[in-house]
Amino acid sequence: MWWLFVVSALIELAAGAASLFSPSSIPAFNKLTTGQGAEAVRWWSVAVISLGAAAFLVRNAPDSDVGKQAIGFGMLIYNIFLSIFCLRDYPKASSVGVLVHIPLAVGFLYWLKTSTAFFSF
């Protein structure tokens, strides 16, 4: 399951790089003070969070289905929160945010559905 965090982080890193190299940001002298630079920093900070979560899961992966289920719910909430954040603050990045985080949230829902402990409450 940790690899989903890594995939999310790679897409977020690419989105940050793409926001810096968009045609509207090229004429800017200092890109980090423009809107595109702030957008790139935001994407990259989210990528660092995703990579940190992946590293935590690799080190402390739970063996029980209940632990895996709790991590699945956490990832679902994480992706929904990031999708709302993308839609609220950066309309230009909203399509990227939805394309990245909503499919991952749906993937975690499917993973939870197939988990043996999902209906054990």
Image (tube, helix red, strand yellow):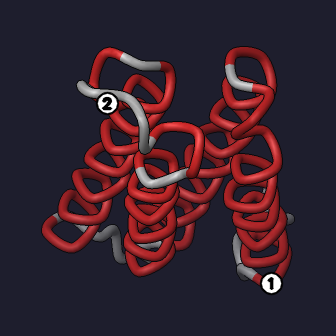
Query: Residue 81's spot in the image, x, y percent?
Result: 68, 30
Question: Residue sitting at 38 percent across and 72 percent down?
Answer: 6
Residue shown at the point (29%, 70%) measured from the top left: 61
Q: Is residue 41 above or below residue 6?
A: above
Position of residue 63 measured from the top left corner of the image (x, y, whole percent) = 36, 77
Label 1 crowd bin: few (<14), some (14–19), many (20+), radius 10 Å: few
- Mark seen at residue 114: 1
Which mark, by number, is residue 68?
none
Residue 59 located left or right of residue 39: left
Front residue (pair 117, 5) = 5
Between 33 and 78, the one lying in front of the other is 33
Label 2 sits on what residue type? Answer: Lys
* Residue positioned 57% across, 50% down in the render: 23
| Circle 2 crowding by C-alpha within 10 Å: few under 14, some 14–19, many from 20 | some
| Front-lying residue, 89 or 46 | 89
Give the residue at the far left of this rendering: 59
Amino acid type, label 1: Thr
Can residue 39 be seen?
A: yes
| Residue 120 image point, x, y percent | 79, 63
Tag 2–tag 1 contact (CB < 8 Å): no
Closest to the camera, between mark 2 and mark 1, is 2
Element type at mark 1: helix
Mark sitting on residue 31: 2
- Above or below — where is 20 with respect to 106? above
Q: Position of residue 68 (x, y in %)?
A: 51, 66
Q: Earlier in the sequence, mark 2 or mark 1?
A: 2
The secondary element bearing badge 2 is classed as helix
The answer to whether residue 118 is seen in the rendering is: no
Question: In terms of depth relative to the viewer, which is nearer, 111 or 86?
Answer: 86
What is the quadrant of residue 101 in the picture?
A: bottom right
Question: Taking 42 as reference, is 45 left or right?
Answer: left
| Residue found 78% across the figure and 17% down from its top | 88
